[in-house]
Amino acid sequence: MNITIIGVGKIKEKYLKLGIDEFSKRLTKYCKLDVIELDDEKCPENLSEKDMLIVKDKEGKKILSKIKNNSYVIALAIDGKNLSSEELADTMSKLAVRGNSHITFVIGGSLGLSDEVLKRADYKLSFSKMTFPHQLMRLILLEQVYRAFRINNNEPYHK
């Protein structure tokens, strides 16, 4: 299976880089992993609604340019479906059985994802109704993808 994670924003914090590197290394046993880090658009604190849409659209165009046509796209969105770890594992397993061998997870920037990216998504996934920093979500997502592979292979890790 091929897993691509497209994330907006650079990871600057050393502790996040270490965690991301660790789960990326662990995942090499289960899939071909590609993590694509896109620059976020600079924006001042007090943006108007119109300016927010412009920023999300610019980031969205960058994201869309990196999505392969044959990829099943899962957008991380606060209004997406909440899944347990077992349900995410089951979803990934069913996608593979149906011939979707390439899954792309998309993590937006601090303002979220553009409408165009959400329209391109085949599935919207929410980890919580809470808002998390997009850099931290990359680590959480990698851990959950790793957990899903472990669950699907009946290997110890998930408790």
Image: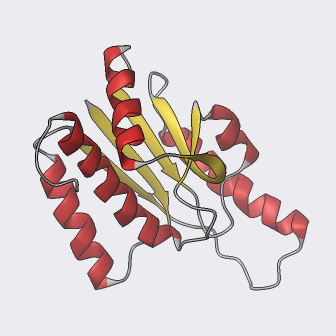
Residue farthest to the front? 159
Rendered residue at 63%/47% (across/down): 80
Relative horizontal placement of residue 153, taking residue 132 as reference (left or right): left
Height in image: 51 above or below 24?
below
Height in image: 25 above or below 130?
above
Residue 32 visible here = no
Quarter residue 109 falls in: bottom right
Relative horizontal placement of residue 14, taking residue 155 as reference (left or right): right
Q: Position of residue 128 (x, y in %)?
A: 57, 61
Q: Position of residue 157 (x, y in %)?
A: 16, 55
Q: Nearer the viewer, residue 136 or 147?
A: 147
Q: Position of residue 10 (x, y in %)?
A: 43, 71
Rendered residue at 37%/48% (across/down): 85
Q: Nearer the viewer, residue 151 or 35?
A: 151
Rendered residue at 79%/60% (across/down): 54
Q: Position of residue 26 (x, y in %)?
A: 13, 54
Relative horizontal placement of residue 110, taking residue 66 as reference (left or right): right
Q: Nearer the viewer, residue 41 or 125?
A: 125
Height in image: 122 above or below 115?
above
